[in-house]
């Protein structure tokens, strides 16, 4: 069964949700960076924070390109949850900060995995696919650093 192309209003709403999620993830990475105890890990986290910032900027530009104004990037319930979880875990240790970021990346990976299934114009789909590729790279690195067993099922 072929799903109809999403209308502009729905697309803008969903892109806005992703934009807010990336803004929330950027804030969470700020917390984790403060507690990263290895320079290499801190460098990766800084790059991933920058990826989330770029995702949010690109999504804003896409929404504007659709003739709409992007939503304010204030945290919603999920954002408060992400930020709070990261602060709590990061305060304990660098490893706990990585564990918090793993949980956050599971959320962003799941969200982008769903988004690349949307029936949207090719340029929007390409942006979602690029962002999803970044998210997959983020979680793969974090799992590697946390020594997640290769055979363990991922939850995203």
Image (spheres, rainbow, N blue to C red):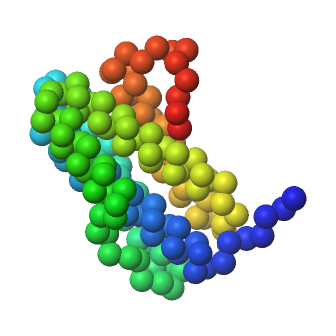
Rendered view: 67 above or below 49: below
Looking at the image, which residue sits at the far bottom?
Answer: 67
Rendered view: 83 above or below 139: below
Looking at the image, which residue sits at the far right?
Answer: 1
Q: Is residue 129 visible?
A: no
Q: Which residue is more in the foreground, 126 or 138?
A: 138
Numbered-mark total: 0
Residue located at (51% from left, 51% from top): 111
| Place of residue 60 in the rendered image (x, y in percent of width and height, measured from the top left) | 41, 71
Q: Which residue is more in the foreground, 18 or 42?
A: 18
Rendered view: 111 above or below 98: below
| Place of residue 62 in the rendered image (x, y in percent of width and height, measured from the top left) | 49, 71
Please give left or right for residue 21 compared with residue 85 in the image.
right
Asked where in the image residue 69 lies, by quadrant, the reply is: bottom left
Residue located at (32% from left, 75% from top): 72
| Place of residue 51 in the rendered image (x, y in percent of width and height, measured from the top left) | 35, 49
Q: Is residue 80 visible?
A: yes
| Place of residue 79 in the rendered image (x, y in percent of width and height, measured from the top left) | 32, 57
Asked where in the image residue 32 lies, by quadrant, the reply is: top left
Residue located at (34% from left, 61% from top): 77
The N terminus - image quarter: bottom right
Rendered view: 96 above or below 83: above
Residue located at (50% from left, 67% from top): 15
């Amino acid at each position: 069964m072929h799903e109809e192309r999403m209308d502009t209003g729905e697309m803008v709403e969903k892109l806005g949700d992703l934009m807010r999620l990336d803004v929330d993830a950027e804030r969470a990475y700020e917390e984790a960076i403060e507690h990263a105890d290895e320079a290499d890990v801190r460098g990766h986290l800084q790059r991933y924070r920058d990826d989330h910032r770029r995702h949010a900027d690109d999504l804003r530009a896409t929404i504007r390109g659709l003739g709409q104004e992007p939503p304010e990037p204030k945290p919603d319930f999920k954002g408060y949850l992400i930020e709070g979880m990261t602060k709590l875990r990061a305060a304990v240790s660098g490893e706990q900060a990585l564990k918090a970021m793993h949980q956050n990346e599971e959320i962003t990976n799941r969200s982008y995995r769903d988004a690349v299934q949307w029936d949207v114009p090719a340029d929007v789909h390409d942006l979602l696919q690029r962002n999803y590729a970044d998210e997959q790279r983020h979680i793969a690195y974090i799992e590697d650093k946390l020594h997640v067993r290769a055979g363990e099922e991922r939850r995203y």
